[in-house]
Amino acid sequence: FLLLGTLLVGFGIKIPIVPLHTWLPDAHVEAPTQASVLLAGVLLKLGTYGLLRFGLGLFPDAWQIVAPWLAVLAVVNVLHGSFVAISQTDMKKIVAYSSVGHMGYVILAIAAATPLSLLGSVVQMVSHGLISGLLFLLVGVVYSKTGTRDVTVLQGLLNPERGLPLVGSLMVLGAMASAGIPGMVGFIAEFIVYRGSFPVFPIQTLLCMVGTALTAVYFLILINRTFFGRLPDTLANLPRVRLQDRIPSIVVTLFIIALGLQPNWMVRWSEATTSALGDTMHRSIATSSLSIVRRQVAYEKAMQHSTPAVSVSDLSLDQ
């Protein structure tokens, strides 16, 4: 338990798990666009990968005890990240808290530890890496062209003549993918997570579904404030987006759509490993249950042999 607890704290900071998450939004705000893309797209996944391979893989017996508590923390991650994202005005902080919430789905899937949920955790890692990477790329383009990320200042960026129509269109697609709209990789990932986790943690899974609805809320707020409406005169005639800024966003968007339409490309290479981990967990549960039953039977036999039966007739008042 001590070793598993140490791993949970270390990887929990990396993921991050609430309340060990406070470093992430500030890190994204201060980091350049390239660092934010790398942090959200790759580095956060090292924490969940560590839980999957080392926490669950090395300590399956102890995992059974901590898994319910980890599922509760997953719900806290999802709901806390979603509610805080709604209240933010900095585009980068909105996406950063969205990352906190979406990593909660991975935590829930790993806590459930069924073959399907573990597969969902891997798919969600890939999905979140692509979607968050796209969103941070687009936020970086908006900031470089307008000089601000404040959603209360930005408006009308979808203006086809003077705004950033391509960036706005890709942002809408990224928001749809993050909210789990069918046809995008986000829908596939969250569906597998929910389908695999519900038999083990039904209440926690339903609460996480609320977080999916809240994702749509804060991205609708962001898009409505930033890209619709009248383009202010102070932002008129924005510089055109260079080709080298367009290509990465377009390529990532194509991957998001392609993997949403053909998820088998993403599922096949991870299914064998996650199934093996899930089977290991189930064997551990079966072994533990059998051990408990054997100890109970042995205890009952010992009590029967060591304690003679005493009836009321054997007792006398003289004694």
Image: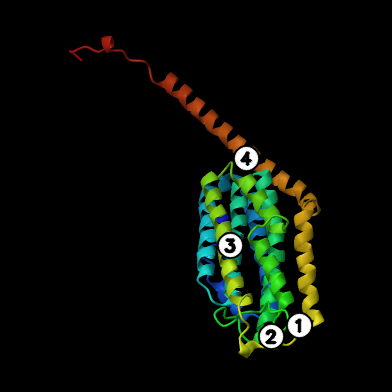
Residue denoted by label 4: 284
Q: Position of residue 262 (x, y in %)?
A: 79, 53
Q: Amino acid at mark 2?
A: Lys
Question: How busy is the neighbourhood of tag 4: few (under 14 within 10 Å), some, or many (20 plus)?
Answer: some
Q: Which residue is mark 3?
A: 215
Give the quarter of the image for residue 160. bottom right
Neighbor class of circle 2 (other Cα within 10 Å; few <14, some 14-19, many 20+) is some
Q: Which mark is residue 145?
A: 2
Q: Are marks 2 and 1 in contact (CB under 8 Å)?
A: yes
Q: Looking at the picture, tell me which residue is in the foreground, 302 or 65.
A: 65
Percent x, y of residue 107: 60, 55
Question: Which residue is drawn at the image coordinates 62% and 51% (left, top)?
Answer: 109
**Marks 2 & 4, CB-CB < 8 Å contact:** no
Task: Find disc 1 in the rendering and name its residue.
Answer: 241
The answer to whether residue 49 shows anywhere in this view is: yes
Q: CA distance from mark 3 to mark 1?
A: 28 Å
Amino acid under disc 4? Ser
Q: Earlier in the sequence, mark 3 or mark 4?
A: 3
Mark 3, Cα crowd under 10 Å, few <14 / some 14-19 / many 20+, is many
Residue at x-position 77% and y-position 79%? 245
Q: Is residue 14 visible?
A: no
Q: Quadrant of the C terminus?
A: top left
- Quote the CA–CA distance across marks 2 and 4: 55 Å
176 vs 312: above or below: below
Spatial CA distance of label 4 from label 1 is: 55 Å
Q: Please, what is the three-letter code of the amino acid marked with disc 1?
A: Val
- As measured in the structure, the alpha-carbon distance from the residue carrying label 3 to the one carrying label 4 is 36 Å
